[in-house]
Amino acid sequence: MCTRSDISAEDRTVEICANGLQWYADALHGRPTSGDCPRCLLDLGLVQRVPDGSLAPIPPRLAAGAQMDRLERAIEEKKTALAAMRTSISQAQEIYLDSYGKGDSHLIRVVQGANAISATLSAAVHACQEELLTAQPGGGRPQAMLDKALASDLEAIGRGVRQRTIYQHTIRSHQPTLAYVEHISQAGGEVRTLDEVFDRLIVCDRKIAFIPDPGSERSEVALAVEHPGVVRYLVGIFDHAWQRAAPLRNFPSSRLPPLLTDEVRRAILRHMVNGYTDEAIAARLGMSTRSVANHMRWAAELFGSRSRAQLAYLIARSGFLDDAPE
């Protein structure tokens, strides 16, 4: 095929094909031509229709002049459009910065509403060129959210972005999230899990970070942070958690490995000793209240306690939470 028909005419790349070269040579030497004139010859202007309706070969230099003039005009138009866009973006950037006042206040801004947050995150991930860091607390994610994230993440990895994600241990028994993680890992992404993730965090190219607004009770408020010092601090927190997290490799497994089961159990009991309710523990560890209750029941049987207060006392006195598992 000598031309591509799936793109616009002005952007189409035309290359002369072997059949076109032979047809052109035959026409120049007055030999009979076989078949219809190849499209590439017409697109390049090497063959043109004369008043009597026949086709005549044109010297390449003459044909090239008209074709190159057209391309040069298109390039100049693109350059003019690019310059106009840069000017418009620069003007909008000045207004954007002025709206946040002087100093560094514009480097941390509030994004409100689920749609605005989603659009802002999508734009940042699409612009990401080198590294994407993500911390996702709360256990397994909804299927619709996973499907939306998968396409975006695979596209980022495909253009060379290194992706590292931290989940909680509880996603190791959540099949939809495991399926998503398997696709991401096969593409080159890295995933690890912890018993408890500090909070939701997304960092793009170590230049902009997104975190929940800690001063708001609403879940539809986020902070976009571009202050270099704050971004470095958040990356440091992520890297520290990454070093402590366990790699996620065994996707077919529907149960936590014994070591991680013990780690989750210790986290549950540690929060219980510190006075958290089952509901609060479940929210922090990204699991169901029923699962927390099952671990509590196991601990009560192990220590022989008859009440929550007695269980907390026995666990604290036993030193069960003092040492990490081997």
Image (cartoon, rainbow, N blue to C red):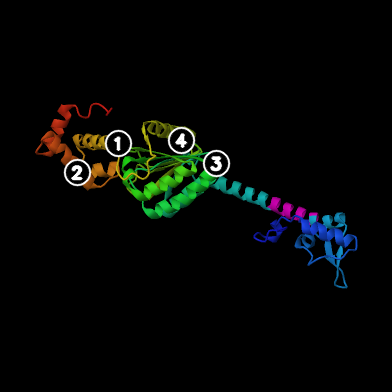
Q: Residue at x 77, y 63 (%)?
A: 38
First in sequence: mark 4 vs mark 3: 3
Query: Which labelled disc corresponds to residue 294?
Result: 2
First in sequence: mark 2 vs mark 4: 4
In the depicted view, which residue is nearer to us: 223 or 302? 302
Q: How much space separates mark 4 and mark 3, taking CA atoms?
A: 22 Å
Q: Is residue 25 above or below residue 140?
A: below
In magenta stretch: residue 69:
yes
Q: How much space separates mark 4 and mark 1, taking CA atoms?
A: 30 Å
Q: Position of residue 117 (x, y in %)?
A: 44, 50
Task: Please name the amino acid that badge 4 sits on.
Answer: Val
First in sequence: mark 4 vs mark 1: 4
Q: Are marks 1 and 2 in contact (CB under 8 Å)?
A: no
Query: Which labelled disc corresponds to residue 231?
Result: 4
Q: Secondary structure at mark 4?
A: helix
Q: Secondary structure at mark 1?
A: helix
First in sequence: mark 1 vs mark 3: 3
> Left or right of 9: which side holds 50?
right
Query: Which labelled disc corresponds to residue 160?
Result: 3
The range drawn in magenta is 68-80
Crowdedness of circle 2 by 10 Å Cα count: few (<14), some, many (20+)? Answer: few
> Left or right of 124: which side holds 44?
right
Task: Please name the amino acid that badge 1 sits on.
Answer: Leu
Q: Residue at x 41, y 34 (%)?
A: 238
